[in-house]
Amino acid sequence: MDNSGYSQKVNDVIQGDDFELLESDPTKKFPSDIKVCIQQSSYIFPDHNVSRSSLVPMNPQAPILYGLPKIHKEHVPIRPVVSYIGAPAYFLAQKLNFLLLEKSEFKPNYRLKNSLDLITKIKDIRIPPKSMLLSLDVDSLFNKYDIIICWTGTKRQLDVFLNKINEIYGKFIFKLELEQDCVLNFLDLTITRKESLHEFQIYRKPTHTDTVIMSSVAT
């Protein structure tokens, strides 16, 4: 993809219904609003050695949008990504994220660390007869969240389910990939249903190059 093609795809995204043209750049006024919020919420930071002024950047900038080309898909669509680095609430968001993780006792039971974790969790689970493996992910969402499901209903019920969850919030559209001949590609695994159990193989997309960046180059 050349520069003109990339620019056109990004412009197509901006021209969509998800963006609104403003009369002026509001970035400069946000730091004062954030300072007021911090002053009114000082109880959030009582036990932390943090300068409240350090939570507001000196020279904030508007978040930057760029596109990640999906080179494995037809016509190479882009996934829009908004970089929040340098934005008015960037440091505050980091701090609040840290506090929420520190204070929250919620531990998700179904979160996966990696493909090996998935294998460990489902390798001994017996699959019900006439069930289907499928994966769901949200279209154009960054970061990308993949969901694997063992569906025990009918195909018609699955269509109803997909329509229902896509009606919840119109901006998030779930895309479904259904197993083919008892085989489903999920993350970097090929999962095969065989005699009510799973078999696993490494899966690589057609665009995978097997190129490895040496540590001496990456550091």
Image (cartoon, rainbow, N blue to C red):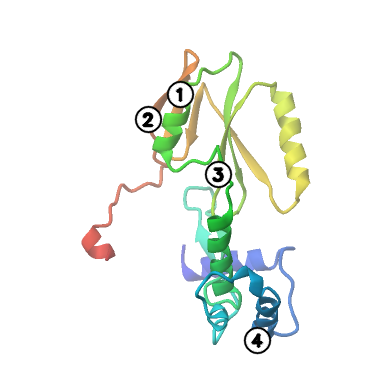
Element under disc 1: strand
- Judging by the rendered image, the residue that carries numbered circle 1 is 192
- Judging by the rendered image, the residue that carries numbered circle 2 is 201
Give neighbour class at mark 2: few <14, some 14-19, many 20+ (Cα, 10 Å).
Answer: few
- The mark lying in front, picked from 3 and 4, is 3
- Judging by the rendered image, the residue that carries numbered circle 4 is 28
Q: CA distance from mark 1 to mark 4?
A: 54 Å
Residue 171: image location, x then y, percent:
72, 54
Residue pictured at 55% horizontal, 37% vertical: 110
Q: CA distance from mark 1 to mark 3?
A: 29 Å
Q: Amino acid at mark 2?
A: Gln
Quadrant of residue 163 in the image?
top right
Q: CA distance from mark 4 to mark 2?
A: 52 Å
Give neighbour class at mark 4: few <14, some 14-19, many 20+ (Cα, 10 Å).
Answer: few
- The mark lying in front, picked from 3 and 2, is 3
In the image, taking residue 125 as reference, residue 157 lies left or right, namely right
- The mark lying in front, picked from 4 and 2, is 4
CB-based contact (under 8 Å), mark 1 and mark 2:
yes
